[in-house]
Image (tube, coloured by chain):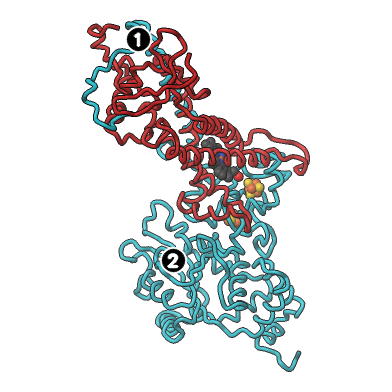
Chain colours: A cyan, B red
Amino acid sequence: MKKSESRFDVELRRRGVSRREFVAFCGVMASTLALPRSLEAKIAAALQKSEKPVLVWLEFQDCAGNTESFLRATKPTAAEVVLDTLSVDYHETIMAAAGHQAVEALERTVKDRKGEYIVIVEGSIPTGANGAYCTIGGRSALQIAREVCGGAAATIAVGTCAAYGGLPAASPNPTGALGVADAVPGLKNLINLPACPANAENITALVVYYLTFKSFPPLDQYKRPLFAYGKSIHDNCERRAHFDASQYVEAWGDEPHRTGYCLYKMGCKGPVTFQNCPQIRWNEGTNWPIGCGHPCIGCAEPDFWDKMTPFYQHLPNVPGFGRAASIDKVGLLATAGVAAVFATHGVISLIHRSTGPKGGETPPPPVEPVEKVGKGDRP
Amino acid sequence: MSTSIPDAVSTSGRHYPIDPHPAEHSDLVRVYVWEWPVRLTHWAIVLSIAVLAVTGITIGYPLLVVRGPAGENFLIGTFKIVHSYAAIVFTLSVLSRIAWMFLGNHFATWDKFIPVKSRRRRGLWRTLRFYLFQLRKPPGFIGHNPLAGLTYTLVFGLYLVMITTGFSLYSMSAGVSSPMRVFRFLVPLVGGLQTARFIHHGVMWLLIGFAVHHVYSAVLMSQVEANATMESIFSGYKFVHKDDVIYSGYRYIDPKDIHDQHL
Ligand code: HEM
Ligand code: SF4
Ligand code: SF4
């Protein structure tokens, strides 16, 4: 073993990550990626001999939450080592270089490693006012994204803002913010990792998949990897048995809430939202929102701020009917209105018929001359 | 009472299979209007919508709270399954009826729904005037009157919206190997799943509103026409004045003409 120790192995040893921990990590990655355990060895081998792929991390209209998520680590882990195998040539938040130096580093990568580097985008791209709402080094986010993403081997949009516009794009979207797919259409190998923020586990798993297979995993219709977004929250939820049994939390802190019943009636969007939170959880597997009694708000869905609100209501309100106007209240009232209209019509119709001459027993001859009828002009 | 059914021939030369009314000296003739596929799909749609609405509202707002171990109860789970089976009945009925618009008899075809002929467009206006009490009698169309036909066009459109949003909702929980997964392509088309739910609820109320109107109109028409409209959706037959067979769609009486007409 010792004689052919790779750079990766040296790195693991230097940080005190044992072989056992590394293999366990590969197992976790295999299961996160929904791959058979038998591929664990392939993943381990691929990681050990992988070359450093070049990575560029662009931040536009964002809160750096995905960066935080990506960099979070409480102790040196195998994941950290994997992420360190990436050569991060440009990342505003963590790079030492600043100003012109930093911009030059980015330009160098785009020029010298064209078609080889991977770009991660965080934050939405404003298109209003000719892109003036977000400029870096005198160039608009849109210009930078076109050039940098256009020359990349692959683009990964992390977080809901980069994927779909997110918070900046929420109505009324003052800056004309768009996700990468809409702002720079036609990118090859675009992958969305939405969520607010994207789960570090999924970013890592995506990188591991790429390092292992030199390709990208299958995606859904929103360009999200199926391994992380293939099943709804609801279908993997640990409270699902309570849903099926009709056992619901009715108010915060009530008996069912304390027992851990289903949060459907508190506005849980789990049935219409997708991510692997129930399995991989958050903060290194500590817990996840529904696990600690809060409904899913659908943070990984397109237009989530506009469509998933009100967060604690089952359905959106009916626009133009004031606050808390549910479609079912409006519908019920409208139906009552229809019934009232026809009841009135019925009464008038009865009066009308009882006062007028009797009709019906003897239908009258046609009022219009029959000769007017053209051929084929029948009912 | 004859057993062989003679054909009445209208001025345009169209043949209607009719039967003299059994009552003697009657001007009424018996016309076979609704063939069995029309009646069958009609009632399948009525029943499935009733089941879908009840189960659907319960899924949206589960009122019953069950006590006891979760594993021993499956109440909303059952409602969801019933909703899915009723949805299959509903979808197949709607599609069959649409197919029958191209296969069925004179009264079932698509041009009874969309008023492409000028004569039906005229009838549209007259039927509306009847509803607004400006005419004493509706124009004597034997099958759907043009206004009803146009309303059903909208209703079939609403059915298709329910099916589209329903299948997109279904596709979300279809397993990776389920064929229902193909309907995921519908999800972006209906504006995402939360919007699909919203539309699914809103259109349900439009259909419930339509049901109220539909039952009322059927009762009303049955009374003013006195031609067994209500019975026809069970039996298929309507009893129609022989003039209506020949000059179908022409009978209508303006209240201001009443004194000139010998009624
Ligand atoms: C006229 C017919 C229909 C009516 C009135 C109806 C009504 C409803 C209602 C009120 C809901 C509750 C939605 C919610 O609050 O989440 C619902 C859910 C649903 N409907 Fe329908 N529906 C109809 C037809 C269909 C059809 C044709 C399908 C096709 C598969 C379908 C599939 C579904 C599904 C999958 C759900 C979601 C259940 C869940 O939350 O798991 N529905 N329906
Ligand atoms: S808590 Fe939410 S995701 Fe979990 S079963 Fe209930 S509705 Fe579904
Ligand atoms: S449970 Fe829902 S809202 Fe919470 S992180 Fe997961 S997808 Fe986002």
Dot 1 amino acid type:
Thr
Mark 1: C-beta under 8 Å from nearest atom of ligand 1: no
Kindly identify which residue carries mark 2: A180
- A354 on left or right of B208: left
Q: Chain of mark 2?
A: A
Marker disc for residue A255: none
Q: Is residue A352 visible?
A: no
The residue shown at (72%, 78%) is: A41
- Residue A102 in percent (x, y) is at 44, 81
Kindly identify which residue carries mark 1: A362
- A292 on left or right of A365: right
- Residue A354 in percent (x, y) is at 37, 6
Closer to the camera in the image, B78 or A182: B78
Q: CA distance from mark 1 to mark 2?
A: 73 Å
Q: Nearer the viewer, mark 1 or mark 2?
A: 1
Q: Quarter for ligand 3?
A: bottom right
